[in-house]
Image: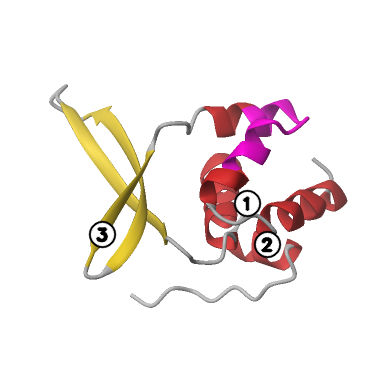
């Protein structure tokens, strides 16, 4: 995907209301790799209320070293957060695009999360 096309896609995704809407756009993208990556994520998100926040998690089940199924949970964003958080996560996890680069394509400033 060319940089201009990537920037246009990221900008369109950032105009969406939330993660479900952005995922729908990704699933129908004309770029087969992007569409397939988005389709592979369907059904892997969960919403949970933690410490008064409605958090969106990516949930997968994988086999550990002992061959047992184990659930892995990754906090993606909170409900109501700017969709750029999901968009940056998607391109980092699926295509190794640095979050900073995705934020830059959207015309936004990336701030490293505090640890």
Q: Residue at x 32, y 40 (%)?
A: 59
Mark 3: few/some/many CA within 10 Å (<14, 14-19, 20+): few
Left or right position of 7 against 38: right
Q: Quadrant of the C terminus?
A: bottom left
Q: Is residue 29 within the magenta segment? A: yes
The answer to whether residue 42 is above or below residue 114 is above
Q: Are marks 1 and 2 in contact (CB under 8 Å)?
A: yes
Circle 2 sits in a helix, a strand or a loop, which is it?
Answer: helix
What is the secondary structure assignment of the residue under circle 1? loop
Task: List x then y, in percent, for residue 27.
Answer: 63, 32
Write down the residue under mark 3.
Answer: 49
**Residue 17 x %, y %:** 60, 57
Of the pair 31 and 80, the residue shown nearer to us? 80
Of callouts 3 and 1, the N-terminal one:
3
Residue in the foreground of this view, choosing between 71 and 97: 71
Specify the segment rendered in magenta: 23-35
The disc label shown at residue 101, or none: 2
State the residue position of label 1.
Answer: 97
Residue appearing at x 61%, y 47% in the figure: 22
Determine whether label 3 and label 2 are within 8 Å by CB: no
Which residue corresponds to the image point at 71% horizontal and 26% vertical from the top-left?
A: 32
The Cα–Cα distance between marks 1 and 2, rounded to whole angstroms, is 7 Å
């Amino acid at each position: 995907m060319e940089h201009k096309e990537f920037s246009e896609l990221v900008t369109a995704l950032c105009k969406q209301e939330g993660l479900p809407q952005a995922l729908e756009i990704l699933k129908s993208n004309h770029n087969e790799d992007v569409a397939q990556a988005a389709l592979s994520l369907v059904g892997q998100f969960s919403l949970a209320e933690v410490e008064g926040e409605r958090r969106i998690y990516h949930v997968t089940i994988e086999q550990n070293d002992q061959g047992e199924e184990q659930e892995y949970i990754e906090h993606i964003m909170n409900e109501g957060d700017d969709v750029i958080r999901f968009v940056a996560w998607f391109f980092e996890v699926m295509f190794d695009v640095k979050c900073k680069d995705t934020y830059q394509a959207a015309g936004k400033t990336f701030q490293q999360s505090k640890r």
